[in-house]
Image (cartoon, rainbow, N blue to C red):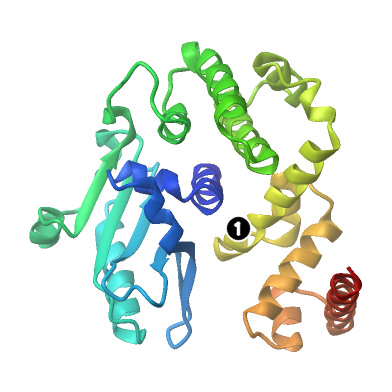
């Protein structure tokens, strides 16, 4: 689940990384939106989908699966979800499937019934440890490769990526978002180390104290709430996992579910909350939106 979250954040914040992985121009990301999609008739959700813009019907939909644990039923589930989605949606775009593995040894899914698909151009399997090495890969590919970097060299590689981010990414918020993701990858590699030790390892101790870093960190964490809800995590589990206050996570969860056209009663039941609490959060959200609109009008 931790690795899934990392890739979700990477693809959501830096979709060009995905297109680099599949040897497409990074600029292709400008025509796509990465999200999870729901098939309401069947009550299931596909977590990683790149949908092309509505004015680009000739471009394919990309279904992405990140798999870091052996799963014999991966391909049966993957193709079932794809074909059900294609059957129920009104979209007429073609499709491609991409499965990302850390190593070939994790690719243990049953393939006999899907040989033609897997050998076709429709499906691509990517093994991160086989991406190859260049003197200085793009910052996107380098960040993805950091996931499978040996512990002995991970710290050095991460520091180099952070330096590269500071040189190449002009947008301060985007730069800090990527640095936070690099830091998160390293923290997963060294779970025995404290946050302070990780920051010291990466030379981020002073950087972490900046207001922009702290604001960006909180926003980035809250953006993972919808995805973690789809994995069945409770509000309390999510709050503990991302290190934020339960109330902040609860507000984000309620806002997300209300935006997905669930009723107040359905949201309350899904999250185990009192209906009045959900109504209050919905009311606060509406007030915040109205205040923001008034501010924009004034400016």
Work out whether 250 lies above or below 188: below
Q: Is residue 209 left or right of residue 10?
A: right
Looking at the rendering, which quadrant does residue 180 occupy? top right
Report the label total.
Answer: 1
Q: Is residue 164 left or right of residue 108?
A: right
Residue 220, how many percent across, how many down? Answer: 68, 49
Residue position marked by numbered label 1 in the rendering: 228
Looking at the rendering, which quadrant does residue 112 occupy? bottom left
Looking at the rendering, which quadrant does residue 32 occupy? bottom left
Residue 44, visible in the rendered structure: yes
Residue density around tag 1, few if under 14, some if 14–19, many if 20 or more, within 10 Å: many
Q: Residue at x 43, y 43 (%)?
A: 17
Residue 14, how many percent across, how many down? Answer: 51, 47
Residue 71, visible in the rendered structure: no
Q: Describe the element under mark 1 as helix, strand or loop.
A: helix
Residue 236, how many percent across, how many down? Answer: 76, 56
The quarter in which the C terminus is drawn is bottom right
Residue 192, how many percent across, how many down? Answer: 65, 22
Q: Is residue 186 left or right of residue 118?
A: right
Relative depth, front residue between 186 and 111: 186
Q: Residue at x 66, y 59 (%)?
A: 225
Q: Residue at x 48, y 76 (%)?
A: 38
| Residue found farthest to the front | 299
Work out whether 72 lies above or below 167: below
Work out whether 15 lies above or below 44: above
Q: Residue at x 59, y 20 (%)?
A: 163
């Amino acid at each position: 689940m931790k690795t899934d979250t990392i890739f979700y954040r990477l693809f959501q914040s830096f979709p060009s990384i995905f297109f680099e992985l599949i040897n497409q121009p990074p600029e292709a990301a400008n025509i796509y939106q990465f999200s999870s999609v729901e098939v309401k008739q069947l009550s299931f959700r596909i977590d990683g989908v790149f949908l092309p813009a509505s004015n680009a019907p000739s471009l394919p939909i990309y279904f992405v699966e990140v798999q870091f644990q052996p799963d014999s039923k991966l391909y049966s589930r993957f193709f079932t979800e794809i074909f059900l989605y294609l059957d129920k949606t009104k979209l007429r775009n073609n499709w491609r499937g991409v499965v990302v593995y850390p190593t070939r040894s994790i690719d243990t899914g049953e393939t006999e019934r899907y040989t033609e698909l897997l050998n076709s151009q429709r499906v691509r399997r990517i093994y991160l440890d086989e991406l190859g090495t260049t003197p200085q890969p793009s910052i996107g590919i380098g960040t993805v490769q950091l996931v499978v970097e040996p512990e002995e060299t991970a710290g050095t590689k991460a520091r180099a990526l952070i330096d590269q981010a500071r040189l190449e990414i002009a947008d301060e918020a985007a730069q800090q978002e990527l640095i936070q993701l690099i830091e998160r990858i390293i923290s997963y590699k060294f779970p025995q180390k404290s946050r302070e030790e990780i920051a010291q390892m990466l030379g981020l101790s002073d950087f972490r104290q900046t207001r922009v870093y702290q604001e960006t960190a909180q926003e980035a964490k809250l953006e993972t709430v919808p995805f973690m809800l789809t994995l069945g995590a409770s509000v309390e589990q999510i709050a503990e996992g991302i290190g934020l206050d339960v109330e902040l996570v609860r507000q984000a969860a309620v806002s997300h579910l209300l935006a997905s056209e669930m009723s107040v009663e359905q949201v309350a039941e899904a999250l185990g909350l009192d209906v009045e609490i959900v109504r209050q959060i919905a009311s606060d959200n509406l007030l915040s939106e109205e205040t923001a609109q008034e501010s924009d009008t004034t400016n």
